[in-house]
Amino acid sequence: MYSWKLQLAVAVGFGLIILINQVFFTGFTALELFQNFLANVFIVLLIWKSAVWVTQTGERFFNWLERPLKRVLLSGVLGLVCSFLVVLISAYFFQLLYQSPFPGNNEIFINTLISFLLFSVLFTGFNIIHFLEALREKQVKETVARLGNYFEQLIENVEDIVQVWDTDGRIKYSSPSAEQQLDYKISELTEFPPFYWILEEDKNGVKNRFEAFLGEGKRGVYFDQFRVKTKTGAVRMLEVKISDGRTIPMIEGLIVTCRDITGRHQTEQLIRRQKELYELTSSISGSFLRMDFQSALIEMLEKMGKFSSVDRVYVYQLNQEKNYWNCLHEWRSQKGNQIPSIYYQNGIPTEAMQWTFDQLRSNRILNFKTLDEMPPEAEQCRKAFEADGTVGILLLPLRINGELVGMIGYDALFEPKNWSEDDIRFLKLCSEILTSSLARSEAEASTRASLSFNQAIIDSSAEGFLLANLQNKVVYANEIFLGLWDLEKTPVGLSVEEMSKLVEPKVENKEEIDRGFEILKENTQAVFTMTLNLYNGKVLEVYSAPQVQDGKLVGRIWSNRDITDRILSQREELEKGMALAQFESLKNQVNPHFLFNSLNVLSSLVHVDADLSEKFIDQLAKSYRYLLEQKDNTLVSLKVELDFVNSFIFLLKIRFEDKIQLEIDIPERFHSMQIAPLTMQLLIENAVKHNRISKDEPLKIFIGIEDLYLVVKNSLQVRINHVPSTGLGLKNIQNRYLLLSPEMPEFGPEGNFFVARIPLIEEK
């Protein structure tokens, strides 16, 4: 207890005080004074140690906050004993040192009394400190216990998974929500090895990022995403926030919050995948327009190989006699280069792979995850593929005018490869582009400098294409383009600027067209995308890219794609949510309980106050008239909503009298602003439903304006036996505002109030 420096300083201080007294009031020599000073320092140190020992002994047997009287009595007895022993030890030691007689009983008694007084001073100081520390520790424990109970209940009821990891990644604690979302029991999760529950493909990446976070030595937060496999085998995507809680008592680990974003991730993946497919198709098509066939083929196979994550992609063409496959090009991944291809240089006789030739000639796609899936009659072909190091294979026929001219193959060399139907449809589209380019290449060499796609492919495409030359003149537009823009005649011969003026009246967001031309002014070789909303309800995605031939710019390609269905589908989902929100809101307001309570109040009021009863009926009629008038409206002015709220509050005040206190402070200049109807009424009824209301604790509600937000604030006095909340009311308000405003409503407790902030909308 306390450092030796402090102990020595206190002992020297007491020794100096005694020394000064002896200098003035005794006749000791200098040597005797020095010897006495050392003796007194030694005695004080012994008394200090005794006081420390007695304090620790009392602490071991009696806590200050439990039995202080017994502790004092025990300490007093031990203090007397220790003081007496210190005096005897000192007297004996100094008798030997100074060759002096052993002190008498009277002197031993006086020295013991003085030592005990010094002991008592030190002991009292130590115990005051111990008492304050014990009191503070008790307060801290009580506070921690209260907070612990609060946060434990909060964590157990939260939808997100809350966990505590140790620095190895092992789960020390997990909230109960993990059992519902992952199907594992909490005891199973805490017994798993580090990162066991994470999907194998993501495990190393998560572990490396986790170790990097710990290795930085910072006490911060980092975010991650990874996939996990549930006990039932389902794969879920989690969004994870990891906070450093190693210095927090009772946690001493990493605080990990996991949110299931599987649905959102799948939607994002689908949208990203579609966008990638569209961009890749456009890029491949553009390559065959601006490059010679062989260069475009090489670029295509490289892009397809990387996009498909396979080890080898190749194109074989049949000779005119249909008895030999010639390899036009083969692309290999960096890993795939480890396994050389036997047939790349020499090609393959059709008779060596007769079964494959027959299947492709019948326009069949050969898709085998592993070669073991091939039928017995394909044994010769299977051995040929095995000799080339192939594990799994996908072969697509290349056909011109219904006749087999070649094939494009995708080989997996190390692990089996699964192909989805969407993947195969996309690869077939690329095969058609390749087939078209191959046909043009064989038919006429001059088509390599052409500014357009093969017309058959373009016209059969679902996209509208427009091609312009270096003079910005339209040289080609397919039928799809004319149909998308409702054009009666072809725009060939017009300048791109004239073409834009022709279609501009059909476009709502004309600024997108202006943005596109601004980009072209800055960079003639720019690639960009525009989303145009037409007055006829269509939504077009326009992709613009330069056409380059032999390293020279020769024109520009404009690709138009109708994405109306996709946009409408997204809007439909939002509108469904909006309609549901409106329905739920109306259903919650015109509910039997509200009417029943109102009629009960009225029945008791009729016999007491006829005039007030008449007013009550009038306000009740106004409330229901408002509900019926506004049920189909998306927005209503703030003034109209306030008139309704006043009627509604009138009914509540008749029912609850002074137990509800309402204050409205909305300047008149905001009365023309708009909100979703029934919003304020829903928030007020929510406050009444979930809070205590009495004369001693009246419910206080304030309605005002803050930064173009309507603020509804009520005192937070949650019922002890509160009605379980479904949260549908607040969710309904949020769903309605998805289509009404870019700003979203905000709800939550703030101090002693529950606050709702509703964005105000300008009147159109």
Image (tube, rainbow, N blue to C red):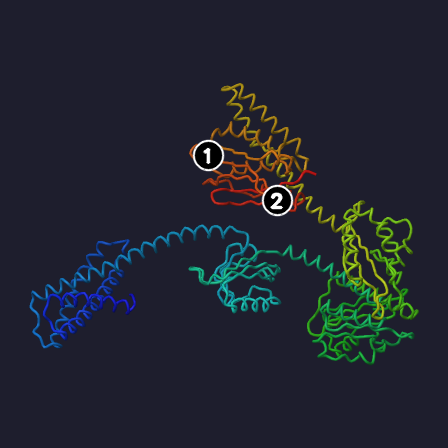
Alpha-carbon span between mark 1 and mark 2: 28 Å
Q: Which amino acid type is marked by label 1?
A: Pro
Q: Helix, strand or loop at disc 2?
A: helix
58 versus 533 height, above or below: below
Q: Which amino acid type is marked by label 2?
A: Gln
Q: Quadrant of residue 225?
A: bottom right
The percent position of residue 404, horizontal first and vertical second, equals 87, 68
- The one nearer the camera, 603 or 547, is 547
Mark 1 and mark 2 residues within 8 Å of each other at the beta carbon: no
**What's the residue at 49%, 53% (across, down)?**
155
Q: Quadrant of residue 262?
A: bottom right
Mark 1 sits on what residue?
698
The percent position of residue 629, horizontal first and vertical second, equals 66, 31
Q: Is residue 355 visible?
A: no
Q: Helix, strand or loop at disc 1?
A: loop
Q: Taking 499 as reference, is 337 left or right?
A: left
Mark 2 sits on what residue?
734
